[in-house]
Image (spheres, rainbow, N blue to C red):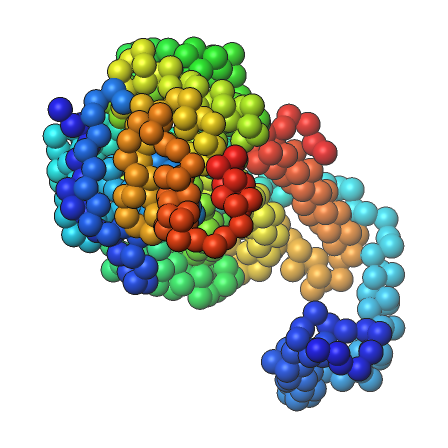
Amino acid sequence: MAIIELNDISKTYPNGYPALARATLHIQEGQFVSIIGPSGAGKTTLIRLINGLEQTSTGCVVTDNLKVCKHHLKKIRSRVGMVFQHFNLVDQLNVMTNVLSGRLARSHWLPSLFYLFRQSDREAAEDALQRVELLDKAWERADKLSGGQQQRVGVARALAQNPKIILADEPVGSLDPVIGRGITKLLKDISRTDGITVVANLHQMKMVEEFSDRIIGLNNGQIVFDDTPSRLDDESLYYIYHGKSKACSHEDKSAHLAVANR
Amino acid sequence: MKTKAHTWQWPTASGRLPGKFFWSLIGAVLLLVISAPLVEINLARFANSIGPFFDFMSHLLVMPDWGFLEQLFIKMLETVEMTVLGTTIALVISFPMGILAARNASPHPLVFIFSRNVLCMVRSLPELVWALVFVSAVGLGPLPGVMALAFVTVGFMGKFFAESIEVVGDKAVEGVQAHGGGRLQIIWYAVLPQAMPDFVGTLLYILDHNLRAAAILGLVGAGGIGYEMIMSMRLYNYNRIILIIGAIYVLVTLLDRLSAHLRSKLIHGKSTEA
């Protein structure tokens, strides 16, 4: 059964920019789904619709059997973790508090205002930090960590809430290739061992092909590719990134190769 | 496009100073020229004042009245107590006021406008005037001084807090929001921690300012060293004035050192001062 359903959704931003047009997409539980496409194709918008950071203009999104609307936001977000390109940690707080902030949705608001958490929250946070191998940095300030470490804290924050889904918006966009691969592999391992659905925006074709169960190609707000990595050939890649097939293009082949090798 | 090869150019399309900037500069200079005579500022008067100024300063080169030290100590202590008390009371009030008066944290636009207005109102009068009001209300002594300090400080600290909150980056905010944090939780876990270094900076600055403000509140009988200062001035009691000025200098310097230490520790997470 699909854990994420986008039913004929469109999204036009208030400034008139059409990010997504009539997209329909059902994502199965436990899969690692990569979203690829050129900048401005609507990848980030698609991801942010799933946990309601953006609202659709038309059509509806159903995440974990709950319609994404104001009424359900907190419930949905308590089951959906998110990893960001720029980590989005609170620099001034220590690593442990950052990870614990992933548990806020299920904490009572009053004790949380005094930074008080239950023993079970603490244990979940420690487990998550153990998982990303950063338990020894638990009491460091978040901004004292390297980029790769900060992103692992970001993953731990998502893990701490025992999510059913992890959304990753260009999780390796600000990391070097080696560390970036480590993060993607970590997300893949999490997906496989815990059965967590991962939806990730990725630009690095090698990782996309190695780790994805399914690839969604977006171009100009439309889903132009939706298949397994083995079916992603040069022709379809060209179509995803250029919005037209190679045959009817007179462009230099090297431009296409440059895209494929990213 | 090749223009004439002038050696020195501004980084604008024409290579010349932007028109707006140029005319603003002219306007500012004109304003100064026009307004100076209105407040009777002229260079001749300034030049004539140099003599009397050094005359006054030379009177300070006298043997301090050491017998005054004990009374000075008591009065300085009172000044410091007034400063700390006034600032602490103001801190407790202006913290929530700051949140309510910040556009991005206020629960409702009406609350935002109302809080902003309250903050403007309390700081529209200086400490000394509020002190006069409170002296006539509760009588002489340090109490009206503390009240006056707290009043004005709420106005300033609340405004500064609100402005620190408004410039907080939205990345961390989104990080907490995406994981299901409620409104208040987002403010507590993402907004306030980011604004905290600014808060600390503001608080330390205001402590410094309030110490000097508290030192003159005695002028209107609102406690502290100010009364001694004004009386010694009127009686040309230079042996005491030199001690009072020295004591304020020492205190302000101590506070400055303390705030530099706290700043590096709290803002940059370092334990030692750079």
* Horizontal relation, residue A160 to residue B11: left or right: left
Question: For this view, does B32 lie left or right of residue B152?
Answer: right
Residue B171, percent from left and from top? 42, 41
For image coordinates 52% across by 57% down, the residue present is B221
Which residue occupies the foreground of this view, A110 or A247? A247
Measured along the vertical axis of the image, is residue A103 above or below residue B80? above
Question: Would you say residue B88 is visible in this rendering?
Answer: no
Q: Is residue B223 above or below residue B70?
A: below
Question: Quarter-wise, where is residue B16 in the image?
Answer: bottom right
Disc tally is 0
Q: Position of residue B201 (x, y in %)?
A: 56, 44
Which of these two is toward me, B106 or B140? B106
Who is closer to the viewer here, A91 or B28?
A91
Work out whether residue A134 can be spotted: yes
Q: Which residue is painted at 52% across and 16% down in the image?
A: A137
Q: Residue at x 77, y 73 (%)?
A: B9
Q: Is residue B125 above or below residue B244?
A: below
* Quarter-of-image position of residue A12: bottom left
Q: Quadrant of the N terminus of chain A?
A: top left
Measured as percent of width and height from the top left, residue A259 is found at 49, 41
Q: Is residue A181 above or below residue B186?
A: above
Residue at x 27% of width, y 35% of height:
A226
User: Residue B150 placed where, x, y %?
Assistant: 44, 50
